[in-house]
Amino acid sequence: MKIAAYSYRDFDEAKYFEKFSARYGVEIIPVREAPGVENAVLAAGCRGVSILTTPVTEEVIRAWKEQGVEHISTRTVGYDHVDVEAVRKYGMALSNVTYSTGSVADYTVMLILMAVRRMKSIIKRAEGMDYSLPGNIGREMKDLTVGVVGTGKIGIHVMRNLSGFGCRILASSPHEKEEARQYGTYCSLEQLFRDSDVITFHVPAGNDTFHMVNRETIAAMKDRVVLVNTARGSVIDTRALIEALESKKVGAAALDVIEHEIGIYYGDYKYQVIGHREMSILKDMPNVLMLPHMAFYTENAISDMVENSILHILKGDGSLVQAAAVREEERNRADGNR
């Protein structure tokens, strides 16, 4: 069986593709460019394609279908870069991957600590030989309430990590988990926003989570609240966040993701105009940590991403398209009952 691996990276993924292709008896066709109509032919004779976060349009999906591709596997948790309706239209399978939850969970706690201890300001000032104290005083975790929005595997791992700091932990999720109750207390999202000194987000992109942080919800938060986002950029209304930082309603933000990051992150754009005004504004704020979607990036996670992508194609697991079909059927049934 052959798999075309698009956006194939020699510097970190290659050794894992070699390892797992040998283990599972598959042939990997490395394609170092992002997927497009013009290179779809490179997937000819492949059962599946493995992709990363560049947009995959209906035109590309149709081109793969014409080459005999049956399965699209994204080596990421998120799949909002793929036209799911087109995948279903052409009768193909779509899957995403899971990976070591410690990668994002550990990184999240690092960002929380850096934000509450004003590390960006401390580091930048020290680089200029400014070792003075004013403006660099921080807060201790034991005095804070941390709100965790989303208690999937990563959210629970974050709560477990935080439990050693002695802080009060609140959690909000549509699906409450008994494991999470070991480390914190469930409450409504409204209460979490109202009572938390730090709020960290661990939810997927979607209609239910789009701009869940906006002018209205920020207004209901504590003054000087710290916002941490290692989930998806669409969770936070970026313009509303900038306004709240400028007014000092939000005390600090640590952002590993931001709206409209696709096509910017993972590229080298030094000495260039990137054309993302909000990113430029936030990057220059002394109380904002802007990081290029790196929370996942550990050796364990890259290994998991490659292996699970291969396994999904090998086993024919197209659970995302199946789940989307079930959701649509449920919506149609609900509409019929109104």
Image (cartoon, helix red, strand yellow):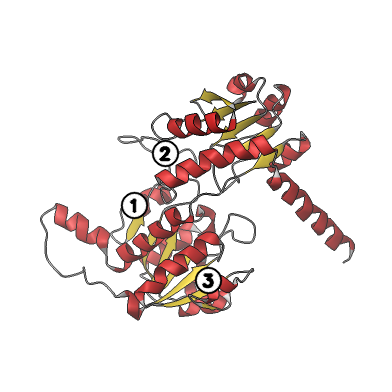
Residue 316, position as x, y percentages in the image: 70, 38
- The residue positioned 68% from the left and 31% from the top of the image is 61
Nearest to N terminus: mark 3 or mark 1: 3
- Quadrant into which the C terminus falls: bottom right
What amino acid type is highlighted by mark number 1?
Lys
Above or below residue 328? Residue 23 is above
Viewer-closest of 34 and 308: 308
Which amino acid lies under the numbered mark 2 shown in the image of this protein? Tyr
Q: Where in the figure is residue 274, as x and y percent of width and height?
A: 40, 39
Describe the element under mark 1 as helix, strand or loop.
Answer: helix
Instruction: Give me the C-alpha separation between circle 1 and circle 2.
Output: 16 Å
Residue under label 2: 266
Q: Is residue 316 above or below residue 219?
A: above
- Tell me, yes or no, if residue 329 can be seen here: yes
Residue named by callout 1: 283
Front residue of 224/10: it is 10
**Mark 1 neighbour density, 10 Å: few (under 14) some (14–19) many (20 or more):** some
Q: Is residue 220 visible?
A: no
- Identified at 67% across, 26% down, the residue is 64
